[in-house]
Image (cartoon, rainbow, N blue to C red):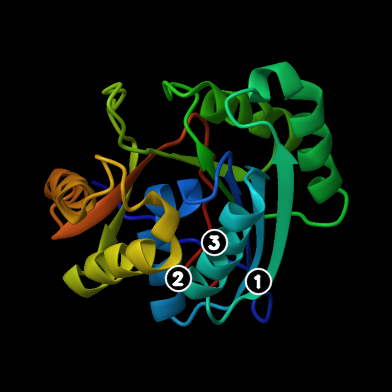
């Protein structure tokens, strides 16, 4: 397994676009990765984009964005498109992402997987590569009863401390979800432990990357 490093020009922050259909999508799928960026002392400029959510859920999303990226230069964009109906609002989702692209050019895009069983997630995953064609797109996974996990191609290892911090913040930032039968510490940590085993780490988050490019540089270049 070949480790890869995200790098930017000296003095320039790493720009990250995180897109979710619903409040909590980003944090479930990539919260540990975001916390890892903070722990690594990488300067981050981030845009959070959430497509759906009631006023209560949008407040949760704002709280979570700050909690998972506490040191980032952070912009949060919240939309109130109808949950479960993003395929019928394809143009509005496309417009929202294109609006982001006019002012923000990310190095990394975190968004759902095209194979996700939830229609809202799939819609975003379909549109992201049409707007952000020259960026690294890592597609995160979200556990659900549909059982739609597949084979990952990219892993982000997490320490045990980060894995548990992720779960703590999920519980703290999203109280509206506590009654759901899948909202359990064992599910979040169990998946992270399984993905960690797959990349010889204690814990990890897993992503799919459909396309990437290799650049060769001389040592010190």
129 relative to 143 in the view: left or right: right
What percent of the width, then of the height, locates residue 181?
24, 40
Examine the rendered structure and indicate whether residue 4 appears above or below residue 94: below
The residue located at (65%, 71%) in the rendering is 9
Dot 1 lies on which element?
A: loop
Q: Quadrant of residue 20?
A: top right
The answer to whether the residue labelled 1 contacts the one labelled 3, judged by CB atoms less than 8 Å apart, is no
107 on left or right of 38: right
In this rendering, the count of numbered labels is 3
Q: What element carries label 2?
A: helix
Q: Earlier in the sequence, mark 1 or mark 3?
A: 1
Closer to us: 124 or 63: 63
- Mark 3 Cα-neighbour bin, 10 Å: few <14, some 14–19, many ≥20: many
* Residue wearing tag 3: 60
- The residue under the point 71% across, 52% down is 78
- Image position of 13 with respect to 102: above or below: below
How far is mark 1 from mark 2, CA to CA? Answer: 17 Å
Badge 3 vs badge 2, beta-carbon distance below 8 Å: no
x and y percentages locating residue 122 in the rendered image: 54, 24
Name which quarter of the figure residue 158 lies in: bottom left
| Residue 36 or residue 22, whichever sits in front | 22
Report, in whole angstroms, how far the alpha carbon at label 3 lies from the one at label 2: 21 Å
- Look at 46% across and 24% down and name the residue there: 118
Question: Which residue is under mark 1?
Answer: 9
Q: Nearer the viewer, residue 48 or 12?
A: 48
Judged by depth in the image, the label closer to the viewer, 1 or 3, is 3
Which residue position is annotated with label 2? 37
Specify which label sits upstream in the sequence, 1 or 2: 1
- CA neighbours of label 2 inside 10 A, class few (<14), some (14 to 19), many (20+): some
- From the viewer's perspective, is 90 left or right of 67? right
**Where is residue 168 drawn, in percent x and y?**
29, 69
Q: Quadrant of the C terminus?
A: bottom right
């Amino acid at each position: 397994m070949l480790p890869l490093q995200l790098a930017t020009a000296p003095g320039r922050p790493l720009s990250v676009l995180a897109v979710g259909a619903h409040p909590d999508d980003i944090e479930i799928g990539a919260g540990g990765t975001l916390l890892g960026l903070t722990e690594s002392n990488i300067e981050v400029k981030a845009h959070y984009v959430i497509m759906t959510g009631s006023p209560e859920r949008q407040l949760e999303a704002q709280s979570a964005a700050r909690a998972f990226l506490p040191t980032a230069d952070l912009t949060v964009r919240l939309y109130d498109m109808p949950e479960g109906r993003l395929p019928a609002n394809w143009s509005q989702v496309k417009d929202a992402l294109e609006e982001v692209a006019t002012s923000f050019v990310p190095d990394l895009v975190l968004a759902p997987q095209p194979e996700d069983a939830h229609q809202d997630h799939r819609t975003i995953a379909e549109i992201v590569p049409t707007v952000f064609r020259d960026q690294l797109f890592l597609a995160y996974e979200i556990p659900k009863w549909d059982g739609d996990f597949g084979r990952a191609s990219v892993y982000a290892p997490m320490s045990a401390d980060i894995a548990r911090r992720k779960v703590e913040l999920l519980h703290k930032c999203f109280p509206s979800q506590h009654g759901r039968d899948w909202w359990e510490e064992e599910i979040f940590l169990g998946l992270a432990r399984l993905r960690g085993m797959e990349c010889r780490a204690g814990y990890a988050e897993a992503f799919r990357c459909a396309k990437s490019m290799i650049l060769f540089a001389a040592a010190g270049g």
